[in-house]
Amino acid sequence: MTIPTFPADLPAPRFSGYRSQRMDGRRQSSFDAGPPKVSRRYSAVARTVQLEVLLELWQKAKFDRFYIDDCAEGSRLFWMPDYAVDGAFLLDEAGLSLLDENDAPLLTAKMMLCQWGDAPPVAANPVLRRQVVSFSVVELPT
């Protein structure tokens, strides 16, 4: 079974609705007196990412088909670009763009292995045949 990929022809999420938080990978043991002991619980920690996307009607239908059919109502894993990093310029230690042999800048690429968040996607604010769809994903450690 192949893992589906988030549709590339959907627009990138809006940065105003982007939030990211790492899950807590610590174990805390409390004692009768003194500070708690903190140790590492997991060797790798997942990250929750909340996103908002402004979609036209045909894009909303494509998003719904991806969620319902390809991801089985949000129960299957999927690949998705990390829009905060993907496509940024690759820099050297001086902060200058790295270039290839044709003097084109090198770009970073990052794909996340995701599962859908706790709640299904929410569509709101229908304006001029567009809707804001907000959803959360959990980036799994790879």
Image (spheres, helix red, strand yellow):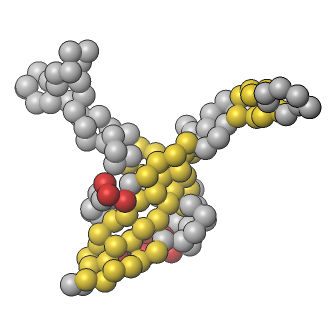
Residue toward you, 132 or 113: 132
Q: Residue at x 7, y 25 (%)?
A: 103
Q: Residue furthest left?
A: 102
* Residue 78 visible in the shown view: no
**Residue 5: percent from the left, percent from the top?**
42, 56
Residue toward you, 105 or 49: 49
Vertical side of 100 occupied by 131: above or below: below
Determine whether, in the image, residue 129 is placed left or right of residue 122. Answer: left
Q: Residue furthest front?
A: 33
Vertical side of 46 occupied by 106: above or below: above
In which quadrant will I find the N terminus?
bottom right
Q: Residue at x 67, y 37 (%)?
A: 25
Determine whether, in the image, residue 69 is placed left or right of residue 57. Answer: right
In which quadrant will I find the C terminus?
top right
Vertical side of 28 occupied by 1: above or below: below
Q: What is the quadrant of residue 85 in the picture?
A: top left
**Residue 116: percent from the left, percent from the top?**
55, 61
Q: Residue at x 7, y 26 (%)?
A: 102
Vertical side of 67 occupied by 104: above or below: above
Q: Residue at x 22, y 33 (%)?
A: 89
Residue toward you, 138 or 95: 95
**Residue 130: percent from the left, percent from the top?**
26, 79
Q: Residue furthest right?
A: 32
* Residue 50 visible in the shown view: yes
**Residue 93: percent from the left, percent from the top?**
26, 15
